[in-house]
Amino acid sequence: KEYLQSLHYEHILVGDEFVPMPVPIVKACSAADKKRIEGKDAIALEAPDRSVVAIMTKPEVYEHRKEERAGRTFGITHAGHPYIKLIMDSGDFLVGGKIEVLKRIKHDDGMDQFRLTPTELRKKFSDLNADAVFVFQLRNPVHNGHALLMQDTAEKLKAKGFKRPVLWLSPLGGWTKDDDVPLDTRMAQHHAIIKNGVFGDTPVVLAIFPSPMIYGGPREVQWHAYARVNGGATHYIVGRDPAGMKHPAKDEDIYHMWHGSTMLELNPGLSGIQLLPFTFASYDKKAGKMAFFDPARKGDFESISGSKMRKMAQAGETPP
């Protein structure tokens, strides 16, 4: 309902509601924009086609503290990080205020029917008689390890007494870095595996999450989880190093693999969702299929990560 009127990195209060703010939701503008905005009671926000999609009332313009924003969001300020580069290249000011949305934003790319609002998602889950909604966030195609994890999650929820667990397959639909798989390709893959019955008799709701990917690790994953709570999720699958990436100047991950899940557990604004641990799946060479890793016979397993799968696909190699 608003762009922030000042930078927040912990939380804001909206009425009596505690809203986590691990990633500040802000709108950059230039010095020229600042001159045009100051003193105005309201300004129009335009889509790329120049149509007005929203009105911002009582806009406030303030300094865009780019290095502070990068450091506090990502823990680094290196401009080789793709989203930090976007921040550094953006306007020197931020503008915030209450937002009145005038019309639904459409992309006209053949996928708008999968861009559902939180209200529409809750209705869809209700129509399916869901008594549990477990969500899996992804920015790349589903591989066999993911599929096994989601199948296992549905069975575990049923074992706990849930009668109608529903899988919310939630691909990220905003900006991603160049080496991630494009949204239309991912959606085609998601449709194919749903059609082929990969998730068995578990109902699946495929709905695009419109946020950009900022690769902010433990802070970004809190934003991902909180947004899904608003959409009706009751359970959230959290994996290793969620929303992480390699350091742009070092051959190591920016974040520890369990940093994200720890931050989710500590966030007081996420008490309405149950976290589901990511069980490590590998290719079982004896069984000839994906299985959960057994340390007692570790020699029988081959690690097949998403990164490894994408490299094999790029090289034209057939994965096991």
Image: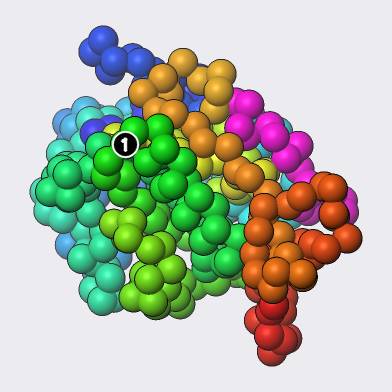
Residue topped by disc 1: 162
- Give x and y (percent) for residue 118: 23, 43
Q: Which residue is drawn at 61% across and 60% down?
A: 145
Quadrant position of the N terminus in the picture: top left
Q: Is residue 16 visible?
A: yes
**In this rendering, is residue 94 above or below 316?**
above
Q: Is residue 260 left or right of residue 125?
A: right
Relative depth, front residue between 22 and 87: 22
- Give x and y (percent) for residue 107: 27, 68
The secondary structure type at the circle numbered 1 is loop
- Give x and y (percent) for residue 238: 55, 40
Q: Residue at x 31, y 36 (%)?
A: 162
Q: Is residue 312 magenta?
A: no
Relative depth, front residue between 170 and 223: 170
Magenta segment range?
245-263
Quadrant position of the C terminus in the picture: bottom right
